[in-house]
Amino acid sequence: MDWREVIDELDSGVERVIGTLSQLSDHDLRAPSALPGWSRGHVATHIARNADSLWNLLEWARTGVEIPQYPSLDARNAALEEGAGRGREELAEDVRATGARFVEQARNLPEGAWNAPVMAMTGWRHPAWYTLYRRWNEVEAHHADLAAGYGPADWPESYVRWSLTSTLTDMAALPETLRGELAGFRITATDSGESADLGWAPGGPEASGSGRALLGWLSGRTDGAGVSVRPDGRLPVPPPWPHQPAAF
């Protein structure tokens, strides 16, 4: 999917997050999310602060002045704790306003800035246009993490197609030491035919399922429902997701 088309997808994704938040009470927002140690308020705050952080990278690309995604990991975590206890209206407005600000920056970024190199908080570099895809993962995956009725079954088909392809490609490029329990596996999407060999050899173990089922499992958003493994046995635990891109 062309990265320019992702901008509209982000608008729609943020609106869906706000729709979910609008159905939650302040008490609901204090309840645990699907992420260990985080309440739903933490997740909503993270979606907003992520928009701010990726806006920083677009501003770096626009100006040529290096701006880190976050000042530091401690600052990122402090902002999460500070914002997590807010009420529904404040949280929803924060998600809306920061999402709109990021998209406005993207729509107005000069053409020549899109290929400028910027850097993720963890230290790997990528062209500015990849920031849009990073944001797409954040919006869709963390919407599911709210554990409030929206999950992988609700992800837009356009997102599933892009993110699954990206995930399989990037996993195949992981060093063996980072493949975890999936080392030696072949993973195949039964609907698209896409696959990734993680050190697989003929006769080796395989995992398969629809692209949506695979993405839910590989992203850690489901327990692997809809994914089968051969030979029969326990479904392996995927390595941490998302992965550093194999190429641009």
Image: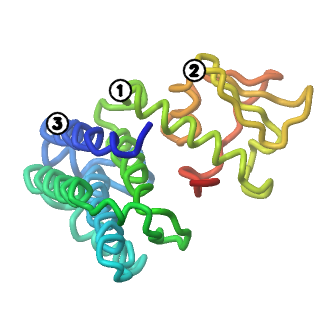
Q: Residue furthest front?
A: 112
Mark 1 or mark 3: name the one nearer the start of the chain: 3
Residue at image x 84%, y 43%? 199
Amino acid beneath label 2:
Ser
Residue ID for mark 1:
154
Measured in 3D between alpha carbons, the distance from the residue under mark 2 to the one under mark 3, in whole angstroms, is 27 Å
Residue at image x 78%, y 26%? 233
Marks 1/2 in contact by CB < 8 Å: the verdict is: no
Mark 2 or mark 3: name the one nearer the start of the chain: 3
Image side of residue 185 versus residue 23, left or right: right
Give the quadrant of the C terminus: bottom right
Residue ID for mark 3:
19
Give x and y (percent) for residue 144: 37, 39
Amino acid beneath label 1:
Asp
Mark 1 or mark 2: name the one nearer the start of the chain: 1
Image side of residue 56 versus residue 170, left or right: left
Residue ID for mark 2:
210
Measured in 3D between alpha carbons, the distance from the residue under mark 1 to the one under mark 3, in whole angstroms, is 13 Å
Q: Quadrant of residue 229?
A: top right
Residue at image x 17%, y 59%? 101
